[in-house]
Image: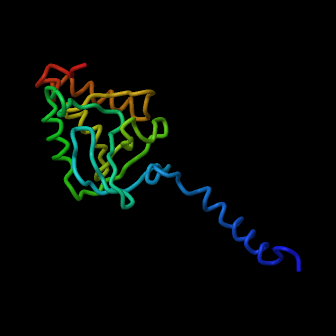
Amino acid sequence: MRPGGPAVATLAVLLLAALPACAQSPAAGEANHDRPLKTKAVVDHVADGDTIKVVVGGREEYVRFIGIDTPEVYGTPECGGAQASASMKRLLEPGDKVKLIRDRSQGNVDVYDRLLRYVVRRGRDLGQVQIKKGWARVYVYDRPFDRLSAYHRAQTKARRADRGVWGLCGGFES
């Protein structure tokens, strides 16, 4: 009898068959930071005017809205921060279902390991809603994002109408 024989051949076939599945599984720490462009999630809570916590694929994740920045509410609070957070809390409540949309022009996560996504509820881009209401400004971190032109148009209208931070605070702090 030869060493290995049919048993080794069978094992080799099984291992080769398993390789494609291993290659497609996400790396450790990347689960749910995967590559789909659209993902459904359920809101856990609103952290502030541009960050929410959601449950997606059974995991809790923080999501930083792509393309917007709102005044700070933590550390040294900024003018309009509380109002920006309150505005987001009116747009999203715990249990709400949202769609998270990835923008391939941006990174998957930020330096705090938050997912970078557009957040859509009932067909409305909530980042753009925050800009239209004047509680957020356009924010480009590293490179332009896909919705930049639309966001700039919304910001121009909000600023001209003195909505949100533009009227309350005279504009955004640097």
In which quadrant of the rendered image does the C terminus lie?
top left
Position of residue 146 measured from the top left corner of the image (x, y, whole percent) = 44, 35
Dividing the picture into quarters, in which one does residue 148 lie?
A: top left
The number of numbered badges drawn on the structure is: 0
Q: Which residue is drawn at 39% across and 28% down?
A: 141
Q: Nearer the viewer, residue 133 or 2?
A: 2
Q: Is residue 21 left or right of residue 73?
A: right
Position of residue 44 measured from the top left corner of the image (x, y, whole percent) = 25, 54
Q: With respect to residue 9, does 90 lie above or below? A: above
In which quadrant of the rendered image does the N terminus lie?
bottom right
Q: Which residue is drawn at 43% across and 32% down?
A: 145
Q: Residue at x 84, y 74 (%)?
A: 3
Residue farthest along the bottom direction in this orientation: 1
Q: With respect to residue 63, does 156 lie above or below? A: above
Position of residue 95 measured from the top left corner of the image (x, y, whole percent) = 23, 59
Q: With respect to residue 170, does 70 lie above or below? A: below
Q: What colour scheme was applied to this rendering of the protein?
A: rainbow
Residue farthest along the right direction in this orientation: 1
Q: With respect to residue 119, does 106 lie above or below? A: above
Q: Which of 33 and 87 is in front in this view?
A: 33
Position of residue 91 measured from the top left corner of the image (x, y, whole percent) = 20, 47
Dividing the picture into quarters, in which one does residue 115 lie?
A: top left
